[in-house]
């Protein structure tokens, strides 16, 4: 719109006063639209909070309601990464009070630390080597943004662990995937290493939810029936889960203790 107005002004089709009035009208309409969308988003947010979602979950629902899916997905990822950085500085994890963390991604965290160190060194070297101030500034800004994203991803691997509690088994990969299975639906848990070589960190393959880390899983969780999970906006029925933990034996024992306590039954052996 602004480009069209500039063209009209340059060609003399309209004068400055008319252009200013057009801008005022258009901007007022856009402001009204933004306010209406904000009001709608706030209503959805409050309803989601009343339904039991936390602040981030409710914000995600609100964004989905008022924005196109791609834009909402990008904003939700940004929010989760910034939240991860905040929680990391406070030395906290995103867990409910009744949940216990199950760590994963040790190898990924090590690689990410190395990448951050190398990128930091390259940032300094490039900034000192380039003779053009504008190019240096542009590359500096892009490099800082990249480092912040890497730091957020690294923080997300730490503050968004898998979690087990009396209500659910929550499986995550950084800020990208967050899937829950009711504890009452867990039949058995065993240590078993496998690799599907998936293109994505989470896929449903033949009724099995596979959440790989470094292209492998080391835990198999059998369910008592069919459970529906949501990945990338689609729903999938599953009867089994394959996931990864840094210490699979300890993780299996911990999960099994909650499974046994979920309905008063005898814990399933690991």
Image: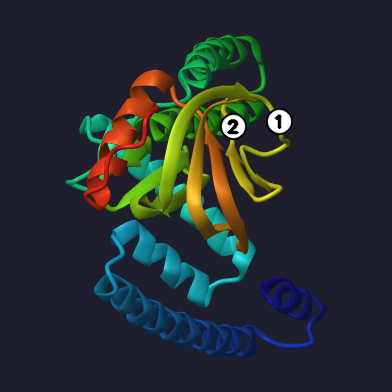
Quarter of the image with the N terminus is bottom right
Mark 2 touching mark 1, by CB under 8 A?
Answer: yes
Query: SS for tag 1?
Result: loop
Measured from the top left, where is residue 82 in percent x and y?
Answer: 38, 43
Image coordinates for residue 56, horizontal then vertical, percent: 35, 57
Q: What residue is drawn where x is 46% and y is 41%?
A: 172
Residue 247 visible? The answer is no
The label shown at residue 196 is: 1
Where is 257 relative to 192, above or below? below
Rate crowding at label 2 as few (under 14), some (14 to 19) or many (20 or more) other CA atoms within 10 Å.
Answer: many
Secondary structure at badge 2 equals: loop
Where residue 14 sits: x, y (%)?
A: 73, 88
Q: Residue at x 45, y 81 (%)?
A: 37
Q: Find the distance from the CA under tag 2 to the CA under tag 1.
A: 8 Å
Q: In this orientation, which residue lies closer to the viewer: 112 or 176?
A: 176
Residue at point 53%, 82% (across, down): 30
- In percent of width and height, residue 222 lies at 51, 42
Kindly identify which residue carries mark 2.
Answer: 212
Question: Is residue 178 positioned above or below 269 on the image?
Answer: below
Quadrant assignment, res 85 = top left
| Residue placed most toward the observer, 159 or 144 | 159
From the viewer's perspective, is 25 left or right of 186? Answer: right
Quarter where residue 42 is shown:
bottom left
Specify which label sits upstream in the sequence, 2 or 1: 1
The answer to which of 81 and 92 lies nearer the viewer is 92
């Amino acid at each position: 719109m602004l480009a069209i107005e500039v063209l009209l002004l340059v060609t003399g089709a309209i004068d400055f006063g008319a252009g200013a009035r057009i801008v005022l009208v258009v901007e007022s309409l856009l402001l009204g639209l933004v306010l209406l969308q904000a009001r709608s988003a706030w209503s959805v947010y409050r309803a989601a909070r009343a339904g039991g979602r936390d602040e981030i979950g409710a914000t995600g629902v609100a964004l989905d309601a008022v924005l196109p899916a791609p834009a909402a997905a990008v904003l939700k990822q940004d929010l989760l990464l910034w939240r991860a950085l905040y929680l990391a500085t406070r030395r906290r994890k995103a867990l409910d009070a009744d949940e216990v963390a199950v760590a994963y991604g040790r190898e990924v965290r090590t690689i990410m630390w190395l990448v951050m160190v190398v990128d930091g060194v390259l940032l300094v070297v490039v900034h000192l080597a380039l003779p053009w101030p504008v190019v240096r500034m542009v590359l500096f800004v892009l490099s800082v943004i990249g480092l912040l994203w890497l730091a957020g991803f690294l923080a997300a691997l730490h503050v968004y662990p898998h979690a087990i509690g009396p209500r659910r088994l929550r499986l995550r990969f950084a800020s990208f995937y967050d899937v829950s299975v009711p504890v009452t639906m867990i039949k058995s848990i065993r240590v078993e290493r496998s690799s599907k070589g998936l293109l994505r960190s989470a896929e449903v393959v033949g009724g099995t939810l596979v959440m790989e880390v470094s292209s492998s899983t080391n835990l198999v969780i059998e369910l008592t029936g069919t459970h529906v999970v949501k990945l990338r906006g689609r729903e999938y029925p599953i009867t089994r889960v394959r996931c990864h933990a840094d210490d699979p034996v300890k993780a299996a024992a911990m999960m099994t203790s909650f499974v046994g306590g979920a309905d008063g039954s005898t814990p399933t052996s690991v």
